[in-house]
Image (spheres, rainbow, N blue to C red):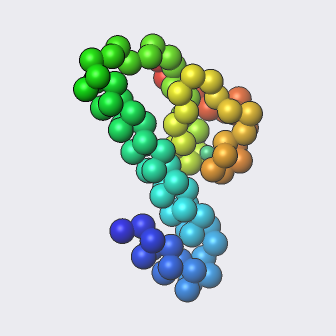
């Protein structure tokens, strides 16, 4: 669904829209991987790690453990990330 939107945004030369679709796409992949990792732990009857999550206020990137220095997707400083416990 997203790649089609990215192409359309390219055609319109609308860089801002293109960027936010790219971010949404990248973040969705990250969320999917996290979800898969959690499922694996549940299936293996492991207790999921008790660690905080940090969410980028701009693009929604989610990181477990510690906030990065800088968001790898949109470049927002890690100090702006929201901590979720
Ligand atoms: Zn970000």
Outermost residue, front side = 44
> Can residue 59 be seen here?
yes
Q: Above or below — where is 22 with respect to 4?
A: above
Between residue 29 and residue 17, name the one nearer to us. Answer: 29
* Quarter that holds the N terminus: bottom left
Q: Above or below — where is 2 with respect to 29?
A: below
Residue 36 located left or right of residue 18: left
Give how far across and how far down residue 33 sits, in percent: 43, 42
Residue name at image x 25 percent, y 26 percent? 43
Residue 80 located left or right of residue 39: right
Between residue 70 and residue 50, name the one nearer to us. Answer: 50
Give how far across and how far down residue 34 sits, in percent: 42, 36
Between residue 12 and residue 62, name the one nearer to us. Answer: 62
Give how far across and how far down residue 22 sits, in percent: 54, 62
Give how far across and how far down residue 21 sits, in percent: 51, 63
Residue name at image x 57 percent, y 80 percent? 10
Between residue 41 and residue 50, name the one nearer to us. Answer: 41
Residue name at image x 44 percent, y 16 percent? 49
Q: How many marks?
A: 0
Q: Quadrant of ligand 1?
A: top right
Residue name at image x 30 percent, y 32 percent? 39
> Can residue 83 be seen here?
no
Q: Residue 3 appears in which quarter of the rendering?
A: bottom left
């Amino acid at each position: 669904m997203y790649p089609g939107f990215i192409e359309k945004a390219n055609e319109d030369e609308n860089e801002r829209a293109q960027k936010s679709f790219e971010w949404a796409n990248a973040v969705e992949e990250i969320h999917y991987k996290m979800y898969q990792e959690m499922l694996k732990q549940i299936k293996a009857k492991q207790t999921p790690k008790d660690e905080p999550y940090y969410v980028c206020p701009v693009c929604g990137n989610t990181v477990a453990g510690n906030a990065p220095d800088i968001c790898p997707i949109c470049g927002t400083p890690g100090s702006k990330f929201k901590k979720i416990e």
